[in-house]
Amino acid sequence: MYLKLPPPALLLITIGGMYLLSIYWPIWTFSFWGQSMMALVCCLCGTLVGLAGIVSFAKVRTTVNPHNPHKASSLVTSGIYRFSRNPMYLGLVLLLIAAFLYLSTFSSLVMIPLFIFYMNNFQIGPEEDVLEALFGDEYRQYCEQVRRWC
């Protein structure tokens, strides 16, 4: 089973859910010194991590489209992929953390584990099955050396 929505669309839906929770169920609002700066740093880091993943794919000219992992022409293990098997998705989670900090309510935090659960089960898992079928032992060895998220 493959993800029906592109990950950026899922990101926007998740942020929308976070916003609604912060408005209609604002449990434990918070504020602290440096909060805005921390949100900005998370946003910047998320953007850079995601872009680094895209650049690594572009360098070897393989597909970045999450709906077509079977069209991968190369197994990318260099660059940021030495540290994370899913830097683009990790970048999205960092953007969600930035949104959580910006919204300032713990109730909005509920959406981040839901996003991760959904991505693990309906996007990453099926992608990994396809990559294992395409690249076999090379991919299995890579999975043993590099963690899924970071």
Image: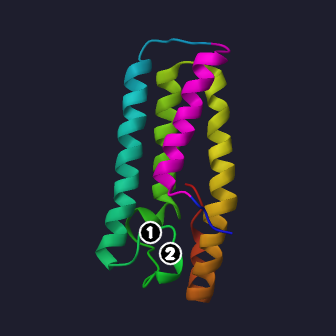
- Left or right: residue 122 compared with residue 75: right
The residue depicted at 52 percent of the width and 61 percent of the height is 86
The residue depicted at 45 percent of the width and 73 percent of the height is 77
Instruction: Determine if the magenta segment contains residue 113.
Output: no
Q: Quadrant of residue 13?
A: top right
10 or 144, which lies in front?
10
The amino acid on which the numbered mark 1 sits, given as a three-letter code, is Asn
Q: Secondary structure at mark 2?
A: loop
Whether residues under marks 1 and 2 lie with C-beta atoms below 8 angstroms apart, the answer is yes
The residue depicted at 42 percent of the width and 28 percent of the height is 39
Q: Secondary structure at mark 1?
A: loop
Query: Pointer 1: what residue?
Result: 65
- The picture places residue 20, in percent across and down from the top left corner, at 58, 25
Pointer 2 local density, CA inside 10 Å: few below 14, some 14–19, many at least 20? few
Asked whether residue 144 appears in the rendered view, the answer is: no
- The picture places residue 26, in percent across and down from the top left corner, at 64, 15
Quarter of the image where the N terminus is located: bottom right
Task: Identify the main secondary structure in magenta.
Answer: helix
Query: Pointer 2: what residue?
Result: 68
Segment tinted magenta in the rendering: 5-28
The amino acid on which the numbered mark 2 sits, given as a three-letter code, is Asn
Relative height, residue 59 to residue 74 (above, below):
above
Pointer 1 local density, CA inside 10 Å: few below 14, some 14–19, many at least 20? few
Instruction: Determine if the magenta segment contains residue 27.
Output: yes
Relative height, residue 49 to residue 73 (above, below):
above
Kindly report the distance in space between the C-alpha atoms of the residues bearing marks 1 and 2. 6 Å
Relative height, residue 139 to residue 2 (above, below):
below
- Left or right: residue 33 compared with residue 117: left
